[in-house]
Image (cartoon, rainbow, N blue to C red):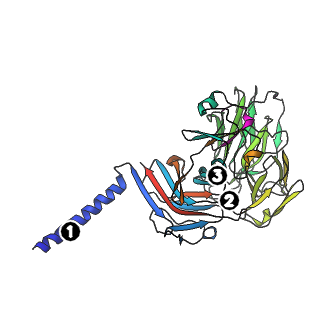
């Protein structure tokens, strides 16, 4: 009888316990759900690191801890939330002997992929002998100690050209004292594919841009084009949209040919404005007509092909002060040799990133004989010498030498990782609102610029996640 009663109790208790466990997993009464994941272990929430060609096999350290080497860039993983959350805090346990910079990016947008990057470790800052001040996640490095606190720094800031920044902004406004508006328009006759961002300068004039574009219908889905203007505080001050051509297929049929969208705003105060060309890869901006003199494209260019627009196609010449640029084409037609002064770079095959390093300083020109090339750099690019300007302070990157930058201060949004035994432990927080989700999946990517050039690696032991309702 006792055994029968016990079995009945077990039969009743098991589904109740399972129901309570599932309820706790879903409703999360504590408000926080924790995921712990060691490399090499299976997890319903965090996948293994990919692609396999950029990571080593999972091994055991002398202490018996799981460890995996990462030797190329980028490496990514997927996380599968089982319900809705508001923010995520990722904790990464790692070892790093030589890389100057390791960042973790959260996929925020696709077509093209856009990642929101946050630092795991910046050894340029951590290994610097400059005087260091910290407050509320901000770091100030000083070549010579001139400020006793960050409050003193912001109360009486130095000149913009004395400050380098990292993952933050320096609010001392940029001004061109001798700038005068002119009563004529200029043309940027270059095919730009998809999403781009640029900065321009306004003083006693109307902001005016007319974009000629085509919807090439090479990918499925609606292709809406939106142009937004932001002021120096990051606030939107103007916006225009162009609807889809009502062809959402991938039949490569151009319905409306060349269309135009006009951005015109009066009464803007003097300053630097950012224009976001928010468009999918199906949209090709063929020409830009503007009355603005200063136009600096930020960090990326996608020089599109000109099929369906004009034959023969043409490439582009642009100008930059960046000393390291990366190039990729996705098609055999984009294979070409790029020229910059006495330097050349051959894009030998599709879907492979190629790096061009420039020795000279100052503004340099780069010529692409044909289009269909993506360009990524830490800095700005313009399509004429006269359009080029530098509204932002110099940026700290993986190739920076502080002593050679010519600055006296570094302002950074950065918290150094803590040391736990043999492991560095870093925390990165993202609001869920910025994450792109596909089939209940988030994608995260590790960025380690220079890892292949340095022929080095870094190692991961553990990735944990705290998810908050």
- Secondary element at image label 2: loop
Gap in Å between the C-alphas at discs 1 and 3? Answer: 56 Å
Disc 1: CA contacts within 10 A as few (<14), some (14-19) or many (>=20): few
The numbered mark at residue 123 is 3
Q: Is residue 275 visible?
A: yes
Q: Main secondary structure of the magenta part?
A: loop
Q: Is residue 468 magenta?
A: no
Check the image and name the residue furthest to the right.
Answer: 342
Residue located at (17% from left, 69% from top): 8
Crowd band around label 3 with a 10 angstrom C-alpha radius: few (<14), some (14–19), many (20+) = some
Q: CA–CA distance between discs 2 and 3?
A: 43 Å
Is residue 439 or residue 429 the one in the foreground? 429
Which x, y percent locates residue 102?
62, 55
Is residue 82 something one can see in this rendering? no
Would you say 459 lies left or right of 28 here? right
Crowding at label 2, few (<14), some or many (≥20) Cα neighbours within 10 Å?
Answer: some
Comes first in the chain, label 2 or label 3? 3
> Where 467 sits versus 271, above or below?
below
Q: Left or right of 337: which side holds 279?
A: left
Q: Which mark is residue 10?
A: 1
In front of the other: label 1 or label 2?
1
Is 132 left or right of 185, judged from the image as shown?
A: left
> In what element is the residue under mark 3?
helix
Q: Quadrant of residue 272?
A: top right
The boundaries of the magenta stretch are: 157-179
Q: Looking at the image, do the residues carrying marks 1 and 2 touch, with CB atoms under 8 Å apart?
A: no
State the quadrant of the N terminus: bottom left
Residue 169 is inside the magenta segment: yes
């Amino acid at each position: 009888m006792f055994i029968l009663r016990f079995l009945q109790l077990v039969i009743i208790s098991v589904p109740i316990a399972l129901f309570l466990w599932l309820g706790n997993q879903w409703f999360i009464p504590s408000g926080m759900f924790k995921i712990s994941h060691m490399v090499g272990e299976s997890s319903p929430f965090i996948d293994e690191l990919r692609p396999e060609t950029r990571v080593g096999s999972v091994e055991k350290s002398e202490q018996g801890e799981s460890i995996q080497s990462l030797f190329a860039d980028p490496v990514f993983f997927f996380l599968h939330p089982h319900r809705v959350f508001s923010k995520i805090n990722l904790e990464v346990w790692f070892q790093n002997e030589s890389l100057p910079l390791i960042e973790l990016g959260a996929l925020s947008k696709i077509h093209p992929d856009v990642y929101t990057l946050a630092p795991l470790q910046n050894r340029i800052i951590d290994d610097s002998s400059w005087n260091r001040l910290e407050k509320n996640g901000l770091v100030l490095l000083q070549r010579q100690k001139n400020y006793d606190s960050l409050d003193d720094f912001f109360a009486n800031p130095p000149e913009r050209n004395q400050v380098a920044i990292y993952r933050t902004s320096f609010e001392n406004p940029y001004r061109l004292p001798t700038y005068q508006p002119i009563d004529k328009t200029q043309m940027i006759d270059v095919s730009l594919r998809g999403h781009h961002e640029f900065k321009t300068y306004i003083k006693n004039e109307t902001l005016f841009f007319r974009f000629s574009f085509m919807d090439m219908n090479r990918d499925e889905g609606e292709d809406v084009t939106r142009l937004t203007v932001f002021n120096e505080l990051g606030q939107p001050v103007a916006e225009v949209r162009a609807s889809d051509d009502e062809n959402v297929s991938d039949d490569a049929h151009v319905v409306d040919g060349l269309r135009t969208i006009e951005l015109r705003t009066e009464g803007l105060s003097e300053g630097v404005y950012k224009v976001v060309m928010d468009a999918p890869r199906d949209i090709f901006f063929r020409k830009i007509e503007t009355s603005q003199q200063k136009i600096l494209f930020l960090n990326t260019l996608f020089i599109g092909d000109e099929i369906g627009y004009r034959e023969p196609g043409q490439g582009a010449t642009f100008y930059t002060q960046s000393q390291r640029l990366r190039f990729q084409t996705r098609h055999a037609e984009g294979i070409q040799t790029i020229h910059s002064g006495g330097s050349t770079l051959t894009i030998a095959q599709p879907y492979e990133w190629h790096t061009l390093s420039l020795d000279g300083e100052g503004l340099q020109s780069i010529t692409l004989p044909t289009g269909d090339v993506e360009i990524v750099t830490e800095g700005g690019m313009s399509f004429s010498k006269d359009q080029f300007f530098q509204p932002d302070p110099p940026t700290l990157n993986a190739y920076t030498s502080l002593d050679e930058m010519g600055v006296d201060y570094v302002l950074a949004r950065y918290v150094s990782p803590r040391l736990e035994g043999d492991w560095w432990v870093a925390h990165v927080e993202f609001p869920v609102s910025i994450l792109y989700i596909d089939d209940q999946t988030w994608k995260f990517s590790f960025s380690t610029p220079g890892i292949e050039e340095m022929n080095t690696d870094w190692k991961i032991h553990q990735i944990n996640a705290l998810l908050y309702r």
